[in-house]
Image (cartoon, helix red, strand yellow):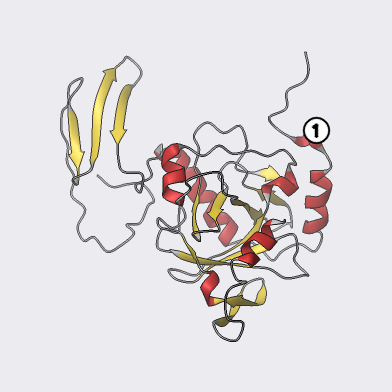
Amino acid sequence: MTQADMLATVDTHADQDNGRLIVQTRFGEFEADARNMLQFPVGLPGFEQCRRFVVLSSVAMAPVQCLHAVDGPPASFLVVDPRLVLADYRCILSGPDKERLGVTGDEPLVWLAIVTVKEDQGASVNLRAPIVINPGKMLAFQVVPYDSLYPVKFPL
Amino acid sequence: MRITDRAPATNQGTIAVLVVTRKRNQAVIIGDAIEVRVLRIGRDGVRLGVSAPASVPVHRSEIYKLVCEENLAAAGAAAMPGDLAARIRSRAQDPGSDPRRTPES
């Protein structure tokens, strides 16, 4: 099951007829489900007031997705599964990290790394500080490890 | 005490500055659940023990600031390059690019 499928399965019990949102971002217009809102209890570093996000996908952008803030100052990020960048990418969560995500066992988690595009169309991906999502509880945060060997700017 | 480049999550009004001298094994309490204790004082640094609830993330400020800067750069970035997906796919097939891999000795 791909990460996109895992996020999509959260929606399978939902009524298809309501809760649809049209979301305008810098990367285009997307349709999202209001019930697929991710809670970021402490926001993102630099965007502490953004507490709710949606992950937006389109065929044209795949495998890149858009992480879009629904509240707080405007913020949209390009994100990608870090395992598509490095097949054996790993990030260890500490006990408090797991508690923050409401992780109790070995439930599947979704990982996203933020992509930075430069003016000259060069791009890098932040493998140092990935976003981790517990799709079962729709809780997420950006992991900020102090001893990761992965760089903040991994070239793409 | 002004926390560098980090806006308060809510409007918390005036930020107070506390300057206090602590000896080894002494601590300060922040709010009712966070304790910062001086564990060791060395020539080059002070070792602190921070006790906080899991809901309060604790970071080294320079690393938090680095991630802040990268997030701000990512949010202000140009449009997505048309070949980005292709670049990502080619990376996945090139395990030699993994920075954790060290040359075999």
In the image, taking residue B41 as reference, residue A66 lies left or right, namely: right
Q: Residue at x 38, y 45 (%)?
A: B57
Residue A16 against residue B57 in the figure, above or below: below
Identify the residue at image location x=44%, y=38%: A95
Instruction: Name the amino acid type tagged 1.
Output: Gly
Give the side of residue B82 with respect to residue A74, left or right. Answer: right
Whether residue A72 is visible to the viewer of this picture, yes or no, is yes
Q: Quadrant of the N terminus of chain B?
A: top left
Is any part of residue A156 visible from this angle? no
Number of marks in the image?
1
Residue for point 17% across, 37% down:
B19
Residue matched to label 1: B96
Q: Chain of mark 1?
A: B
Residue B46 x, y percent position in the rendering: 31, 23
Q: Nearer the viewer, residue A46 or A42?
A: A42
Which of the two residues, A74 or A5, is positioned nearer the viewer here? A5
Q: Looking at the rendering, which quadrant does residue B14 occupy?
A: bottom left
Determine which quarter of the picture holds residue A76. Answer: bottom right
In the orientation shown, which residue stands out farthest toward the bottom? A17
Residue B73 position in % (x across, y down): 57, 55
Q: Nearer the viewer, residue A48 or A104?
A: A104
Quadrant placement of the C terminus of chain B = top right
Q: Compared with residue A56, is residue A103 higher up or lower down, i.e. above or below?
A: above
Residue B97 % position (x, y): 77, 36
Where is A137 relative to B28, above or below?
Answer: below
Q: Position of residue B62 (x, y in %)?
A: 44, 38
